[in-house]
Image: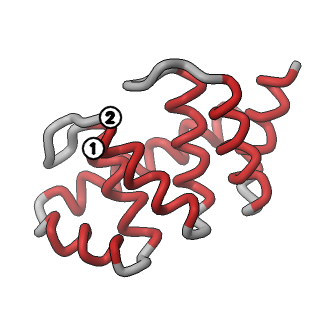
Amino acid sequence: MLRSFIMLLLLFIYASRVVANTDTENYKKSCEGGDIFSCGLLGSMYQWGDGVGHDALKAIYFYEKGCYGGGGYSCLMLGGMYGEGLGVKPSTKNALKFLDLACELEITDGCAKSRQLRD
């Protein structure tokens, strides 16, 4: 479980590094147009400061757009940010909300992390 989460995180980081040298504005336009993958990539870029300045509030903004658009991995990452207090005040309630959304979108790590927080 932890191993798959770490692999997912590394994949997200790798993907964000690949796109970091591209035109970020194109990804913003794509995200605003409903491309949930672009939203997740932008969230990751801002969370980790890859190719853009580190900005937790922008990361949350883009992860939320991706999550509410049906992007399970964005929900998972957002749940992790709230659970760990990464750039935001830690909130178990918000962490569970987004981890449960990830679970509903068939991201098994979301289900597992949600169960861990409830135990």
Residue beneath label 1, please? 46
- Asked if residue 9 is positioned above or below residue 116 in the image, the reply reads below
- Quarter holding residue 53: top left
Residue beneath label 2, please? 56
Which residue occupies the extreme right position in the image? 119
In the displayed structure image, the side of residue 118 where residue 49 appears, left or right = left
Q: Assess disc 2: are there few (<14), some (14-19) or many (≥20) residues with their C-alpha within 10 Å of its C-alpha.
A: many
Which residue is at 56% across, 58% downward? 67
In the displayed structure image, the side of residue 40 where residue 99 appears, left or right = right
Depth check: give the residue in front, 91 or 50. Answer: 91
- At label 1, the amino acid type is Tyr
- Asked if residue 10 is positioned above or below residue 90 in the image, the reply reads below
Which residue occupies the extreme bottom position in the image? 33
Depth check: give the residue in front, 11 or 96. Answer: 96
* Cβ atoms at labels 1 and 2 below 8 Å apart: yes
The C terminus lies in which quarter of the figure?
Answer: top right
Which residue is at 14% across, 46% downward? 52
Q: Secondary structure at mark 2?
A: helix
